[in-house]
Image (tube, grey):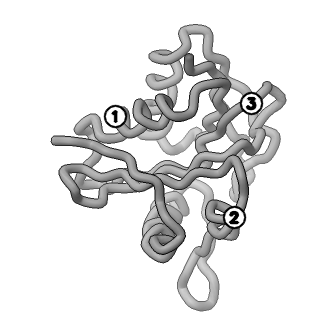
C-alpha cells in the first residue's frame, strides 16, 4: 500500500467539498452540528484554501485511490506560538487502522516544519489516540492546552502544541 499526499488544485475544489460533507457528517456525532435546509453542512472556509497565503489543502491517496484530505492553515487554536495548524483531517473508513493517516501526516510534516497546533474533540477517541501518539512521536515535550474556542456543542477544545523539526 502506497500513501501519497497531493496538493488540491482549484479545479478539484468540488471534490474536496464533497469529502468535507462526509467529514462533517461524521464529526456531527461529536459536536452536534446541523446541516442546512439543503441537507448540507458546508464549509465556510473552503474558498480561502484557494485564495489565501498560508493555507494548504491536500488529498490523501492510497494506491492511486482517493482516501481522504488534510487542511492546513496558520489559525491559532490556543495561546502558544504557531507556524501551522491541522484545520481538518479525514481518512475514509476503508483506509483507517492501516497506517494511512500516520503516513499522510509524516508527508505533511516534511513539507511544513515548525510549531504545530492540532485541535481535537475529547469524545472523538480515534482522533485522541492518533493525535496524541503523533505529537509524542515528533516532540516528546508536547503540551496539551485548552483551545481558545469550544466546539459547537460547547465542549472545550483540546489542542496539542508541539514542534516538528
- In this view of the protein, can residue 18 be seen by the observer? no
Q: Residue at the location (53% across, 64% down)?
A: 24
Residue receiving disc 3: 82
**Label 3 SS:** loop
Q: Position of residue 150 (x, y in %)?
A: 75, 47
Residue at position x 23%, y 54% in the image: 94
Name the residue at the bottom extreme. 38
Say which element carries label 2.
loop
| Residue situated in front as seen by the camera: 35 or 32 | 35
Q: Which quadrant is home to the C terminus?
A: top right
Please state the horizontal and vertical placement of residue 118, each as a whole percent of the image: 61, 36
> Does label 3 or label 1 sit earlier along the sequence?
3
> Which dot, 2 or 3, sits closer to the camera?
2
Residue furthest to the top: 140
> Who comes first in sequence, dot 1 or dot 2?
2
Which residue is nearer to you in this view: 94 or 6? 6
Does residue 23 appear to the left or right of 120 in the view shown? left
- The image's mark for residue 103 is 1
Give the vertical position of 51 relative to 90 (above or below): below
Q: Earlier in the sequence, mark 2 or mark 3?
A: 2
Quarter holding residue 4: top left
The structure residue drawn at horizontal position 54% and vertical position 9%, both measured from the top left corner, is 140
Q: Of tags 1 and 2, which is closer to the observer?
A: 2
132 left or right of 86 in image: left
Q: Which residue is mark 2?
A: 51
Give the structural element (helix, strand or loop) at label 1. Answer: helix
Q: CA distance from mark 3 to mark 1?
A: 22 Å
Q: Position of residue 161 (x, y in %)?
A: 66, 25
Tell me if residue 118 can be seen: yes
Query: Which disc, if any, is residue 153?
Result: none
Q: Which residue is nearer to you in this view: 83 or 158? A: 83
Amino acid at each position: 500500500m502506497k500513501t501519497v499526499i497531493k496538493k488540491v488544485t482549484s479545479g478539484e475544489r468540488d471534490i474536496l467539498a464533497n469529502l468535507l460533507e462526509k467529514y462533517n457528517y461524521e464529526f456531527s456525532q461529536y459536536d452536534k452540528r446541523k446541516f442546512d435546509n439543503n441537507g448540507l453542512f458546508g464549509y465556510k472556509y473552503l474558498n480561502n484554501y484557494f485564495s489565501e497565503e498560508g493555507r494548504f489543502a491536500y488529498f490523501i491517496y492510497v494506491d492511486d485511490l482517493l482516501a481522504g484530505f488534510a487542511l492546513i492553515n496558520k489559525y491559532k487554536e490556543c495561546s502558544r506560538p504557531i507556524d501551522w495548524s491541522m484545520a481538518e483531517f479525514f481518512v475514509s473508513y476503508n483506509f483507517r487502522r492501516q497506517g494511512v493517516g500516520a503516513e499522510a501526516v509524516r508527508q505533511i510534516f516534511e513539507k511544513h516544519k515548525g510549531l504545530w497546533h492540532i485541535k481535537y474533540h475529547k469524545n472523538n477517541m480515534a482522533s485522541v489516540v492518533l493525535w496524541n501518539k503523533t505529537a509524542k512521536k515528533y516532540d516528546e515535550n508536547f503540551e496539551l492546552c485548552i483551545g481558545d474556542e469550544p466546539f459547537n456543542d460547547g465542549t472545550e477544545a483540546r489542542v496539542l502544541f508541539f514542534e516538528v523539526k
